Structures are given as structure tokens and as C-alpha cells.
């Protein structure tokens, strides 16, 4: 898209003054339908931020990037900023690292080897569901240590027909239930389509089936592990009698819940290596059938609520 870059690169790095916004920014208190899956205000604010940017691009086209580049504006303050790529992985806009603009970085990976730009493009290329989340370990310019970042991605088309993947992220984002349910649902869809041969993908830390400390596990209906995040190189552990930190038979409860349900949530107490007391976790599990056999696929997140509060 050379003509697009010619119109973008110079304006982004120059001073154009503030242009009056045509869209009103909505706060996390707005009653947006897109907020329904989310529990935390910081998540809703990020989604609203990206949606507002998409609305501005829909209206103004590439001129919106000039506003997004204004330092200390709504669009560029602290570690909150927008980025944009075309659907081939070429950077269209990045106010923090402007030297990326015009470069195809589809193969750029995070510190775990996750193809971050590839996942961004994949989300925006989905015509049925062109929005979603990418979770990755990232190093901001000028920082010493990497941190986990969660970015919300949207596909947007400007009035001239240019298609972008735009997004923005939060560092150390609180884990939403939808993060883990989406991951498990995607894993189940792939298993039902490709069979058990795809199991090694669940063990790949650079893949899309891990984020933060959440991983996919797969059990058969007797509670034997096919994918065991605790021992990634080992399968076949019999976990039916596994208990949590307070003696709850968690695998037996999973099996029982899925006798009458296709999906289920259950809470349990987990030992934490960085805390002296157990932490409360929430697991999402799903029952699938492959070659007339039943399997349990699931993952879990750490709850932000105090351990003495019920779900």
C-alpha cells in the first residue's frame, strides 16, 4: 500500500495541531453491548478506547492517525496508545515505535516466541468475528523488564476502503472469564476438526493456547491426562483422585458436572509458589467427542476476588 504510506508517514511525525473530535468518547460506565462479557472496568475502558478509535477511522479515514499521534491527548498518554497494521502484517501506525511504520513485521514474536503480529492479523482477518484479544510478553522501549500485555484488536475499514487491524493494550491485565472460555472453545473446535494429533500445539508456550499462567488441559472421561500442564512432557497421569489445596476432589467434580452439561465452571483452591496461602482459581471445562470417545478440555484463571468471597 505505497500510496497509503506516503500519506501517513510524514503526517504522523509532524505537528498538525489538534483536530476537533467528531465522536464523543464513552467511559466505562457506558451501557455498551460490547461490555457484556467483561467484569473489570479496566477491560471496558480499553475496549471503549479501541472502539472509539475505530469510529473515528470510519469517519475520518487515515486523517484520524494524526490525532492518534498527538502526545498527551486522549489517544497518546503514558503507556496507552493505539497501533495499526494492514492484513499482511505491515505496520501502518505506531506512535511509540514510528520506525516500524511501513515495515512488514508479520514474523515478529514476543519473548516466548509467540507470533504477536500474526495473531493480530488473524483476528482482524476473521470476517465473522473480527475482534478479540492477544496476550503476550512484551518489552516497551526504555523499559528493563518485560511484562505481560493484553491487547484488544478490531478490524476497521476507512471511507477509502483501506482495511486495518487496530488495537491497544493493558499491562498486567486482570484475567477475564471470557479469556479462558474463548481459549478452551477454540481448542475444542480444533480438536474436533483435526483430532488428537493437534495436542502438541497445546504444549507450545509460543502458541495461542497459553496466556499468563493459563494453559489448556485435556483429560479422558476416566480422568487420565492427555495434556497435563503440570508435566508438559508427560501424559497418561491418572488424575481422577486429584485434590485441590483444601482437599476438594476437583477432577471427580469435573467428571460429575459434565455428565449433565456440555460446559461448566468450577472453583478450587490452588497452591501458589509466590504466596503463603492458597489462591482461588476458576476453571472452565468443556466436553467433546472424538471418535466416539469423551474428552474433557479445560483451563483456569486466578480469581481477583478475595478467597473468602464466593463466586
Image: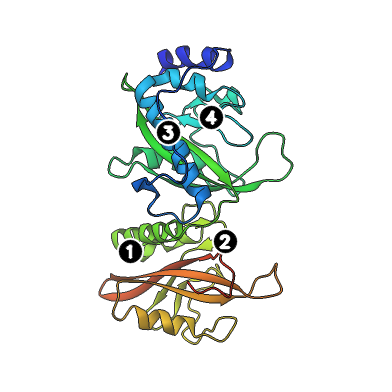
Residue 245 location (% of width, % of height)? 60, 81
**Residue positioned 52% across, 13% down in the render:** 11
Q: Nearer the viewer, residue 166 or 21?
A: 21
Q: Nearer the viewer, mark 3 or mark 2?
A: 3
Q: Quadrant of residue 161?
A: top left
Q: What residue is disc 3 on?
A: 52
Q: Is residue 183 above or below residue 275?
A: above
Is label 2 in a helix, a strand or a loop? Answer: loop
Quarter of the image with the N terminus is: top left
Q: Nearer the viewer, mark 4 or mark 1?
A: 4
Measured in 3D between alpha carbons, the distance from the residue under mark 1 to the one under mark 3, in whole angstroms, is 40 Å
Q: Is residue 177 above or below residue 224?
A: above
Measured in 3D between alpha carbons, the distance from the residue under mark 4 to the one under mark 1, in whole angstroms, is 44 Å
Callout 1 touching callout 3 (CB < 8 Å): no
Q: What residue is disc 2 on?
A: 213
Residue 72 location (% of width, % of height)? 61, 27
Q: What residue is disc 4 on?
A: 75
Pick whichever of labels 2 and 1 is earlier in the sequence. Answer: 1
Pick whichever of labels 1 and 3 is earlier in the sequence. Answer: 3
Q: What residue is disc 1 on?
A: 195
Amino acid at each position: 500500500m505505497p500510496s497509503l504510506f506516503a500519506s501517513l508517514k510524514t503526517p504522523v511525525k509532524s505537528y498538525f495541531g489538534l483536530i476537533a473530535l467528531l465522536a464523543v468518547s464513552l467511559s466505562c460506565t457506558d451501557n455498551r453491548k460490547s461490555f457484556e462479557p467483561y467484569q473489570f472496568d479496566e477491560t471496558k475502558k480499553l475496549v471503549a478506547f479501541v472502539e472509539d478509535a475505530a469510529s473515528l477511522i470510519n469517519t475520518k479515514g487515515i486523517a484520524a492517525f494524526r490525532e492518534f499521534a498527538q502526545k498527551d491527548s486522549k489517544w497518546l498518554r503514558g503507556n496507552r496508545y493505539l497501533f495499526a497494521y494492514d492484513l499482511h502484517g505491515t505496520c501502518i501506525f505506531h506512535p511509540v515505535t514510528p520506525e516500524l511504520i511501513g515495515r512488514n513485521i508479520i514474523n515478529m514474536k514476543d519473548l516466548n516466541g509467540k507470533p504477536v503480529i500474526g495473531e493480530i492479523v488473524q483476528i482482524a482477518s476473521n470476517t465473522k468475528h473480527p475482534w478479540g484479544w492477544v496476550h503476550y510478553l512484551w518489552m516497551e522501549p526504555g523499559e528493563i523488564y518485560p511484562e505481560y500485555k493484553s491487547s484488544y484488536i478490531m478490524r476497521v475499514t476507512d471511507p477509502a476502503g483501506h482495511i486495518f487491524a487496530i488495537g491497544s493494550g493493558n499491562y498486567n491485565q486482570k484475567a477475564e472469564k471470557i479469556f479462558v472460555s474463548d481459549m478452551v472453545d477454540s481448542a475444542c473446535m480444533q480438536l474436533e476438526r483435526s483430532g488428537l494429533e493437534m495436542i502438541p500445539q497445546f504444549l507450545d508456550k509460543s502458541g495461542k493456547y497459553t496466556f499468563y499462567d493459563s494453559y489448556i488441559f485435556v483429560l479422558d472421561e476416566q480422568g487420565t491426562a492427555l495434556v497435563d500442564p503440570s508435566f508438559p512432557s508427560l501424559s497418561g497421569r491418572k488424575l481422577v483422585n486429584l485434590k485441590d489445596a483444601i482437599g476438594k476432589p476437583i477432577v471427580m467434580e469435573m467428571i460429575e458436572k459434565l455428565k449433565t452439561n456440555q460446559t461448566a465452571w468450577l472453583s478450587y483452591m490452588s497452591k501458589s509458589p509466590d504466596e503463603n496461602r492458597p489462591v482461588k482459581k476458576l476453571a472452565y471445562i468443556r466436553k467433546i467427542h472424538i471418535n466416539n470417545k469423551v474428552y474433557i478440555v479445560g483451563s483456569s484463571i486466578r480469581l481477583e476476588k478475595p478467597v473468602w468471597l464466593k463466586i
